[in-house]
Image: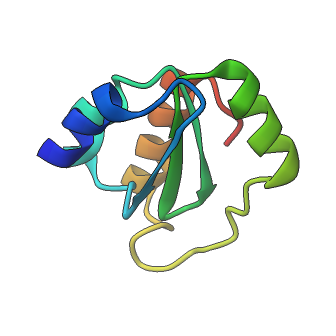
């Protein structure tokens, strides 16, 4: 989680941070530093500073949320992803 906290300062305005296993709530302090992002799939989250870059990637790589594994399909994981999506202004 410390790496995620530090990555925001290092990332260029057009940069993209990719976080795998992002459905874990302990990443929230780092995720909330970003203005934009979306779950490209239930386990991986793209985090961005730039709205234009966010819109570009969302158009090119639409989210695929079909995974219903034991981690993704539970109510608390779904609720957490929705909370993250609301914070990031992203489609779920």
Q: Residue furthest bottom?
A: 69
| Image point (78%, 42%), residue name | 58
Query: Residue 67: which quarter of the image?
Result: bottom right
* Residue 62 shown left or right of residue 25 in the figure: right
Q: Nearer the viewer, residue 49 or 67?
A: 49
Q: Is residue 76 above or below residue 37?
A: below
Q: Which quadrant: the C terminus?
A: top right
**Nearest the camera: 75 or 28?**
28
Q: Residue 78 appears at what percent x and percent y?
A: 49, 51
Q: Position of residue 18 (x, y in %)?
A: 47, 53
Left or right: 78 as drawn, with respect to 9: right
Residue at 21%, 35% (x, y): give it.
6
Left or right of 48? Residue 59 is right
Residue 5's place in the image compared with 66, above or below, is above
Is any atom of residue 1 visible in this view?
no
The residue shown at (48%, 45%) is 81
Q: Position of residue 49 (x, y in %)?
A: 53, 23
Q: Residue at x 53, y 24 (%)?
A: 13
Looking at the image, how many numbered discs can be counted on the residues?
Answer: 0
Q: Is residue 64 left or right of residue 75?
A: right
Residue sticking out furthest to the right: 59
Q: Tell me if residue 57 can be seen.
A: yes
Q: How is the image coloured?
A: rainbow
- Where does the image place residue 61, in percent across and percent down from the top left? 79, 55
């Amino acid at each position: 989680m410390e790496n995620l906290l530090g990555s925001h300062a290092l990332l260029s305005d057009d940069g993209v941070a990719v976080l795998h296993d992002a459905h874990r709530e302990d990443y929230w302090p780092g995720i909330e530093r970003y203005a934009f992002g979306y779950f490209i799939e239930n386990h991986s989250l793209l985090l961005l500073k730039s709205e234009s870059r966010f819109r570009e990637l969302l158009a090119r790589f639409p989210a695929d949320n079909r995974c219903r594994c034991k981690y993704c399909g539970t109510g608390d994981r779904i609720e957490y992803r929705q909370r993250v999506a609301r914070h990031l202004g992203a489609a779920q």
